[in-house]
Image (tube, coloured by chain):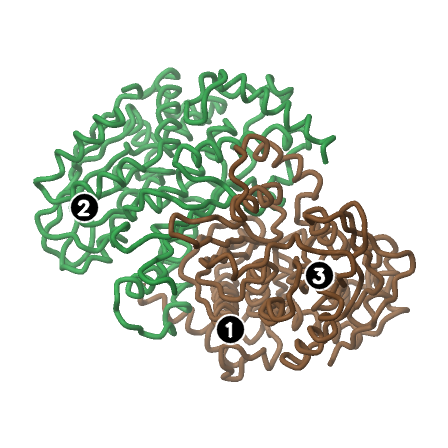
Chain colours: A brown, B green
Amino acid sequence: MGDYQPVAQDALNAAQLELGGATNNAMLRRAFDPTAHDLEPTFRLTRFADLKGRGCKVPQEVLNKLVSSLQQDYPTQDQDEGDQFVHAAIPRIGIGLDCSVTPLRHRGLCLVQTTDFFYPIVDDPYIMGKIACANVLSDLYAMGVVDCDNMLMLLAVSTKMTEKERDVVIPLIMRGFKDSALEAGTSVTGGQSVVNPWCTIGGVASTICQPNEYIVPDNAVVGDVLVLTKPLGTQVAVNAYQWLDQPERWNRIKLVVSEEDVRKAYHRAMDSMARLNRTAARLMHKYNAHGATDVTGFGLLGHAQVLASHQKKEVSFVIHNLPVIAKMAAVAKACGNMFQLLQGHSAETSGGLLICLPREQAAAYCKDIERQEGYQAWIIGIVEKGNRTARIIDKPRVIEVPARD
Amino acid sequence: MGDYQPVAQDALNAAQLELGGATNNAMLRRAFDPTAHDLEPTFRLTRFADLKGRGCKVPQEVLNKLVSSLQQDYPTQDQDEGDQFVHAAIPRIGIGLDCSVTPLRHRGLCLVQTTDFFYPIVDDPYIMGKIACANVLSDLYAMGVVDCDNMLMLLAVSTKMTEKERDVVIPLIMRGFKDSALEAGTSVTGGQSVVNPWCTIGGVASTICQPNEYIVPDNAVVGDVLVLTKPLGTQVAVNAYQWLDQPERWNRIKLVVSEEDVRKAYHRAMDSMARLNRTAARLMHKYNAHGATDVTGFGLLGHAQVLASHQKKEVSFVIHNLPVIAKMAAVAKACGNMFQLLQGHSAETSGGLLICLPREQAAAYCKDIERQEGYQAWIIGIVEKGNRTARIIDKPRVIEVPARD
């Protein structure tokens, strides 16, 4: 096995080059250059899967149907918080939203756990690894869990990759995943990998904690406001970026956006997707959040609706503002119905937390997160009396979020 | 969502039919009949992936190379049992062998965790679900962990499945997975599912326990014997069964085996793969096992070598006996080098535990497991002084394990 080491070492040296000798939690200094790894200049990680974002998910309503077979015959148990949430979690199997919470034999402790995996969405393997890790952890953070005890990595190497491509790309993905885990204060202790037509990246995140360390997302009350901690439009940005190589696609949007705008949006999207929601989770406790979810494959409205459906009180969510990465709303419009960004259905990867906060705390929450991280958060809607649904108003206000803060 | 329920209900009714109203842990009474679900008689679950068994794994030496990037910069820590094993576990990332063990903040507790996923290996979706679950749990059992606290399900629906096929097959797979989890005394509380060219089934198993509840597999001593708790040849059996539909393939083996033999072997293989290694794990404690692993994608010798390489003492494993499902050794020989069954490289799915036991305890261990489960276990080799390797002797004795006990 030793005689294989050098190959992985090469890849790492190149990675170090790009990292500029950066420490674990530093962002890349230089973009991934296939030729620096003796790969074809045309190498694109995103070409090793045909679907991305929501496209790779089993439609929400289909899932609910499929898993209904699992729900129905779970015995009803004493409704202590743990069990109660186990039931709530079952219907969400596969939706990859939030976590399961399992009460343990050991007095007072719970296992909070989540898993998620998907296909390459950016062409930089190292960043892809960081995004995949941030995306898995995001489900824990959505439950207000700040510390992850352990992670496993799930990986599928594409059958279409050459050995050379595999030996360059896979160690970089693993390194990115691991660096993100270290940044989150946890580590990757195992996993599974197979070969598969499509390259697949994901993981499992687990925390053993006391019930007061997580926030069951079902306590929204009339008068709460909704806060979002990352801008929308990541899916639009990564697609627009890929269209730079595809004239017929590019022509559809070049009237509303410049190549420079797209590159900026793409880098902002990568930056945003690789960013951990950990501070957002920590502040949920400080500002008494009533519940949260993370915005991923089913888009802002899809996840808002699931969150609304789980509320104890008869409330509904109304969303007025849509913070979107600069120019991506225009791009989405130019693509007609394709993304449904303004309808709230555009898939996000490793999106922000959507949090129900007491009205008087929301502004302080947003200020605090900006002070700590240098990233803005936005009040995007309100909680009113209703039948546990969510909607976006007719003409929502689009907040253009600059590609560079 | 309620209006989708009936469809899943249909699938379940058909399943119940096949289960003959069986309870959760009963085996199927009747084989899966596609037409009973209004599917084409030619429907074969195994056609929704091109690779099976070892074929779907990243080769062992490649993995060791790829993950070397993760090993190298883990800080050395106090060598208490937990940390020590975390390091031992890292190189195995992706090999899907054994578990990771993570010491927790909560005094004295550890998180023992494993994940595994692969492609359909049998055509009966319900049994496939049971096999997938047993295969995931097997990694915990290999560590002597008897109780699993929680499971997550990983599922990929094939892009090539019709909606009808999906709606029939997926609930049956989930049901089988869940029934197996209940049989193991645990439950499935969440998961993730995507669409993918190949149908994929797997899961995550987690246990929070005290260090005395698991057995670190590194204590083999000279004079120990090796016990195997399930017969080899599952991969040969499932392939031979598929060749019944493929004359050109069938012609290669029909001289050494009858159609009846193959059907019997296939059912014995399904039975064996769906069987939990839980009793085998429980008895490891009773008979002071010095370590174990479960035999899966890399075959008996592949896993024996990994186990040998992790021993504290300078020992080697020598294997003399190969218990094989009846007639499958002959089939393997007739296929030339394809399976390498007698060389110990034939992939197994949800195979038995390979256990190092003190010589004087081994016979009692085998008797006990047969008494409790009605399945045989075999002493297949010895532990001698050596350089932490494993080998099979030149002309190993093949033990023909009857297709029906």
Query: Which residue lies at the image location 69% right of the left edge and 62% below the top edge?
Result: A355
Query: In the image, is A97 to the left or to the right of B394?
Result: right
SS assignment at label 1: helix
Is residue B169 or residue B324 the one in the foreground? B169
Q: Amino acid at mark 1?
A: Glu
First along the sequence among labels 3 and 1: 1
Q: Amino acid at mark 3?
A: Cys
Q: Is residue B61 visible?
A: yes
Q: Is residue A245 visible?
A: no
Quadrant containing the C terminus of chain A is bottom right
| Distance between mark 2 and mark 1 Cα atoms | 39 Å
The spot of residue A152 in percent (x, y) is 45, 57
What is the chain identity of the residue bearing mark 3? A
Residue indicated by mark 3: A356
On residue B289, which mark appears?
A: 2
What is the chain identity of the residue bearing mark 1? A
Quadrant containing the N terminus of chain A is bottom left
The spot of residue B102 in percent (x, y) is 36, 60
| Distance between mark 3 and mark 2 Cα atoms | 52 Å
Between label 3 and label 2, give the one nearer the viewer.
Answer: 3
| Distance between mark 3 and mark 1 Cα atoms | 26 Å
The image shows residue A404, relative to residue A190, as above or below, that is below
Count residues near mark 3 (Cα–Cα under 10 Å), then give few for <14, some for 14-19, many for 20+. many
SS assignment at label 3: strand
Q: Amino acid at mark 2?
A: Ala
Query: In the image, is A305 to the left or to the right of B316?
Result: right
- Tell me whether marks 2 and 1 sit on the same chain: no
State which quadrant residue A144 falls in: bottom right
What is the chain identity of the residue bearing mark 2? B
Whether the residues at callouts 3 and 2 have beta carbons within 8 Å, the answer is: no
SS assignment at label 2: loop
Residue indicated by mark 1: A183
